[in-house]
């Protein structure tokens, strides 16, 4: 079991063994989850490209050309400023 001390500014240092275990590095994001038993779970918010690959792709979307995109943008701008 690892322990750490809360500073007067409300900060804690995550012990190196835990940082290594969770592959945490400076600048990484983490989240704190409070359970129903008032316990806190610390979880890294790191995503690898393999975890998010294809998440924006939707098979029902129609493929459009750049010219069609430019035309749609022009039409929206015209509508907004008319």
Image (cartoon, grey):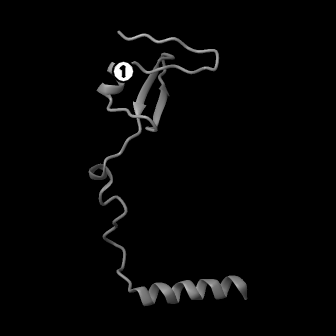
Q: Is residue 51 left or right of residue 76?
A: left
Please give the name of the residue rendered at 43% of the width and 35% of the height, measured from the top-left corner. 26
Q: Is residue 46 left or right of residue 81?
A: left
Please give the name of the residue rendered at 51% of the width and 90% of the height, measured from the top-left corner. 71
**Foreground residue, 50 or 24?**
24
Please give the name of the residue rendered at 34% of the width and 67% of the height, measured from the top-left corner. 58
Please give the name of the residue rendered at 43% of the width and 21% of the height, measured from the top-left corner. 14
Q: Is residue 51 left or right of residue 31?
A: left
Task: Quadrant for the N terminus, please.
Answer: top left
The residue beneath circle 1 is 16
Task: Quadrant for the C terminus, please.
Answer: bottom right
Residue 60 appears in which quarter of the rendering? bottom left
Residue 54, image x and y in percent? 30, 60
**Foreground residue, 13 or 44?**
13
Disc 1 secondary structure class? helix
Residue 39, image x and y in percent? 47, 17
Using a 10 Å C-alpha cutoff, classify the residue at mark 1 as few (fewer than 14 neighbours), some (14 to 19) or many (20 or more): few
Is residue 25 shown above or below 14?
below
View extreme (left): residue: 50
Q: How many marks?
A: 1
Residue 2, image x and y in percent? 38, 11
Q: Is residue 2 left or right of residue 9?
A: left
């Amino acid at each position: 079991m690892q322990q750490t001390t809360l500073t007067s500014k409300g900060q804690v240092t995550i012990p190196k063994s835990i940082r290594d275990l969770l592959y945490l590095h400076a600048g990484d994001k983490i989240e704190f989850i409070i359970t129903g038993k008032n316990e806190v779970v610390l979880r890294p918010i790191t995503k690898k490209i393999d975890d998010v690959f294809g998440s924006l792709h939707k098979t029902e979307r129609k493929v459009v050309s750049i010219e069609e995109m430019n035309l749609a943008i022009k039409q929206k701008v015209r509508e907004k400023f008319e």
